[in-house]
Image: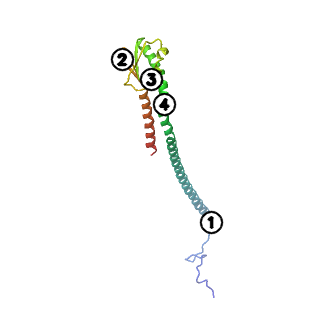
Amino acid sequence: MSITHLLEDFGVTRRGTSLSITDVSLEEERLEAFEKGYQAGWDDSVKSQGEESRRIAADLGQNLQDLSFTYEEAYAAVMQAVHPLLEQMVSAVLPRLARDSLVPRLVETLHDIAREQGHQKIAIAAAEADMPALAHLTEAVPEIDIELGVDDTLASGQIYLRFDGREQAIDMQEVLEGIEQAVSGFFENSRKATA
């Protein structure tokens, strides 16, 4: 016994007419199928490329963020290492440099006064501790009439010049304090910026 009566016959349409495909219509069907497949492949490629571009952009952003974070860490580490060195320079080296540069600074100031005011008598008041360094000042600047005097109210590194009814101060201690404040302020700002 045959089971063909149970199975549908695709060679015949429901109305009983047979279905035939010509070579032209077959070629059109193939072209349409090819176009659909090509378009689907193109769409998949564009989608894949878009996802890859987003992934690369995200990775690049993360790498830049990591690099920026690393730079800030490195900067903070360098500042932390340099801070004690600069503090030691301010407290140990700069006072000696200020002491050593006191007389050259004074000689420069005396020359400036002589150039602007002419040659006149200049009274110089300084601390007792600075007198040995200033003792040879008249030899260093013989063209200026200098009168040295001790002023107990002045600290080492402070000098007052009196001439023609005016006063001018040289205060190496004030300069050192300004440098110390600048260094402290710099490191405080660096600490706040990296925190």
Q: Is residue 70 left or right of residue 171?
A: right
Figure quadrant of the N terminus: bottom right
Point out the tag, 2 or 3, that comes first from the N-terminus: 3
Disc 1 target residue: 26
Residue at the left extreme, as displayed? 165
Mark 4 or mark 3, whichever is nearer to me: 3
Q: Is residue 132 above or below residue 192?
A: above
Disc 1 element:
helix
Q: Are marks 3 and 1 in contact (CB under 8 Å)?
A: no
Q: Are marks 4 and 3 in contact (CB under 8 Å)?
A: no
Disc 3 target residue: 130
Disc 4 element:
helix
Examine the image and state in which quarter residue 4 appears: bottom right
Alpha carbon separation for disc pair 2 and 1: 114 Å
Alpha carbon separation for disc pair 3 and 1: 113 Å
Viewer-closest of 136 and 172: 136
Label 3 amino acid? Asp
Viewer-closest of 103 and 30: 103
Label 1 amino acid? Leu
Disc 4 target residue: 94
Point out the tag, 2 or 1, that comes first from the N-terminus: 1
Q: Position of residue 134 (x, y in %)?
A: 46, 19
